[in-house]
Image (cartoon, rainbow, N blue to C red):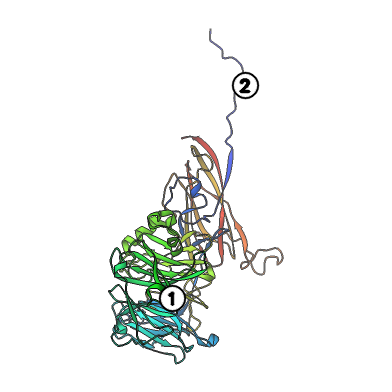
Amino acid sequence: MALAYPKGKRRAAQRKLVRSATMPAPVRGLRASDAIMGIGNTAEAALVLNNLIPRELGGQVRPGSVTVATKLPSVANPDSGEVRTIIGFEGLTGSLSKKRFAATDLGIFDITAESEGPWTEVYSWINTGGDAGWCSYISFTNVNGDPYILLCDEQNGYIVYDGLLGTWAPGSTGAGDPGPEEFVQITEWQNRIWLVQRDTASAWYSGIGAISGDFTEIDLGSRFLKGGFLVQLESWSFDDGSGLNDRLLAMSSAGDVLAFSGIDPGNASQFEMDGRWFVGSPPKGRRVMSDWGGDVMILSSFGLITASVLATTAEDNLNSDLWASKHIARYFRAFMNERTEFYGWSMELAPLYGVGIFTIPQLPGFSDAPIQFCLNANTNAWCMFKNLDMRCANKDSTGFYFGTTDGRVLRLEGHVDNVGMTIEAEPNAGDPISWQTLTHYDPLGNPAIEKMMQFIRPYFIGGAAPSYNVRLNFDFDLNALDGSPQSPETGLALWDEALWDEAAWAGAAQNYESIRGVSGMGRQIAVTMIGESTTELSLLGYDLMYTDGGLL
């Protein structure tokens, strides 16, 4: 007799519950030195963030670029020379006295007016080629109230621009002083000119308000405990609790930074050393300290640190958390190790955009996209700029300018790159700005459970629907999405067909979102995107839809 199973209800298969999660845009910027596991420190952060500035509300596509000069010559390239320094001048009579110059290894050129050449030097270097054109400069008003540009070139020394006469000429020093050709860097402190003498530890200072005549030497060699020559001097106004105190900073080639205070360097009782720190050797060039909105940013092989942090920290307590570059240390070290012996390192604030831009040398003979680090000056969040051929940079009251390796000068402006000059017969209307991101990994609240991903919905706000591709990475795949993004699903109105008061039109800022299918399964999830834009655009975040899988 056959056995019969007991009668009863069959248990229905449990339906998988569709879950959702929201990931904000990486507003905390690059966190390349943190663990990639999805924990608190990496929330709202990215492993790759190119051409998206981490703002308070989302990731904003960086500014575009507008051409203001082309075909600047160099010794080797008569119509596409490397631009090494941009020099701004503002006189005392308003906009008519504003001038802009660019230096190559041939000399200095007046680029105040848009032009594609041919160019004639307003000042020709005596020694061309080599390191000529790598300059430092200051604007200075002498005791008579006359405005000047005072400049030191790495190869040609001390040069003076007379703002009243509009002429350039070699500077002059007193009898017995080194000749002007011996000086390679300049700053102003306590209304005196301070000059760095080539291949020595000597600083030379002028009389009060003087730009020529006798200079007095101060040998800092005995103060540099690590040795080396004097690379750069920089002035700094610091509030130490008793009011503003002007200090003079000096950095050596071996990595010592000295701070001096006082009002009379010729009087030992009124000129004293307040501090000494070892920060690591600087890279090549004399742009390793920069005014930073009331502070001084210092660049070395260890990273980036401000003078105010040094002044409030004992040398033996300079731990990694105090460095401004701590979140990009892994990337920074790689570039520094590879490119420290090349010119092109510099730091400049771009006040109009609320960021600081750090230029990195391009390796000779390589065709990789140029890269700069960018720091949000308000939130201290990092990203990278790409595809800006930024060999040198400078700011003035009219904008942020940069020189290229192929004889151009451009201004950060607008929402597309390489906009041509209006004087050109067929000016370029501009190239789209490409952007890319890979977020840190996120377990979506449950790190032990596999997630079967189904949909993603990115959110944007901007002037037009973005063109982008999106993909999910699983369980610590660090390959960011690359290639060309697909065309946008604009949803915008067609002229002469849509209703005026109901349709969406490009131009004004609008919200854009669309659901896209994704696939794959993993415990930890990261979003990687590439895109292009030609209007103002910000990435706000993503919605994710998925079902839970099994344990482990």
Res. 141 visible in picture: yes
**Badge 1: few (under 14), some or many (20 or more) residues near its Cα, within 10 Å?**
some
Give residue 298's quadrant in the image.
bottom left
**Label annotation for residue 263:** 1
Q: Is residue 385 visible?
A: no
Under tag 2, what secondary structure? loop
Q: Residue at x 59, y 65 (%)?
A: 463
Give coordinates of residue 491: x percent, y percent: 62, 60
Image coords of residue 380 (percent x, y): 50, 60
Up-down: is 302 above or below 191?
A: above
The residue to which callout 2 is attached is: 9
Locate residue 45 relative to residue 494 in the image: left or right. left
Mark closer to the chain start, 2 or 1: 2
Q: Residues within 10 Å of mark 2 (few under 14, many from 20)?
A: few
Query: Which residue sits furthest bottom?
Result: 165
Q: Nearer the viewer, residue 533 or 401?
A: 401
Residue 443: x %, y % from top left: 50, 43
Q: Residue at x 58, y 62 (%)?
A: 465
